Amino acid sequence: MSWTVIFQSRGAIRRLYIGIVAKESTKQRILNAAVRTINEKGEAGVRIDDLLAEVNVTAPSLYHHFGSREGLMVEAQAERFAQSIQTGVDEFVNACRSSTTVEELRLGVRQALAMRSDKRRIEHRLQRLNALGAAYARPELAKKIVDAHESMVVEVASALQPLQTKGLIRSDINLQAVVAWYNGALMGGLLVELEGSTLDPNDWDTVMLDAIDKLLFGL
């Protein structure tokens, strides 16, 4: 094979790669616009003509990537869930990896829970809850949400696993189940955080911390 052929092949691959990136970029721009609109106005507020004008693409391009308005809604809701469920994960994983004692790990958990009251975190949990509700009677969306949730569970549980091996965490618990429980508890905590609730979020925090101490450390 000559260098000319190799160069031409690489050029073809490069053109193909650029074409794929361009298509992905268009798809992501449409998806991002749909996510923003749903966050602001709900699904009913998504108008395809307005979306096309905002992103500056044609209707055939949108339907090429998503098939239909319903296909776009499924992808957008899945994206909303995936984005929101990753909030705070990196910080918690890094705190786990830097912990060398039980007290350091307990401190990291407490710091992560303290961020729960941050307005942005509350908005993300509401976004996650809304996306979950949108999965009703939408099996494709439900599967995407399950996949995003389980990906997060595996990521966090994997960060905790070395600490369990070192004896900083109880050896008789399933870490993935604990992470899934914690996320579910945070979602349930929204009922305490919603306007009009007469329950004290600080009392809820105390119960959560007691439960975590028991689950992870047997304290």
Image: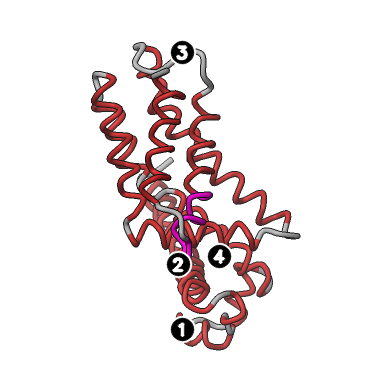
Q: Is residue 94 above or below residue 166?
A: below
Percent across and percent down for residue 22 are 44, 66
Disc on the earlier residue, 2 or 4: 4
For the residue marked with disc 4, what is the amino acid? Ala
Q: Residue at x 38, y 34 (%)?
A: 209
Find residue 195 and name its label. 2
Judge the density around disc 2: few (<14), some (14-19), many (≥20) Cα neighbours within 10 Å: few
Labels 1, 2: front one: 2
Q: Which residues are magenta?
A: 187-197
For the residue marked with disc 3, what is the amino acid? Ser
Q: Residue at x 35, y 19 (%)?
A: 163
Q: Quadrant of the C terminus?
A: top left
Disc on the earlier residue, 1 or 4: 1
For the residue marked with disc 1, what is the amino acid? Asn
Judge the density around disc 4: few (<14), some (14-19), many (≥20) Cα neighbours within 10 Å: many
Find residue 191 and name its label. none
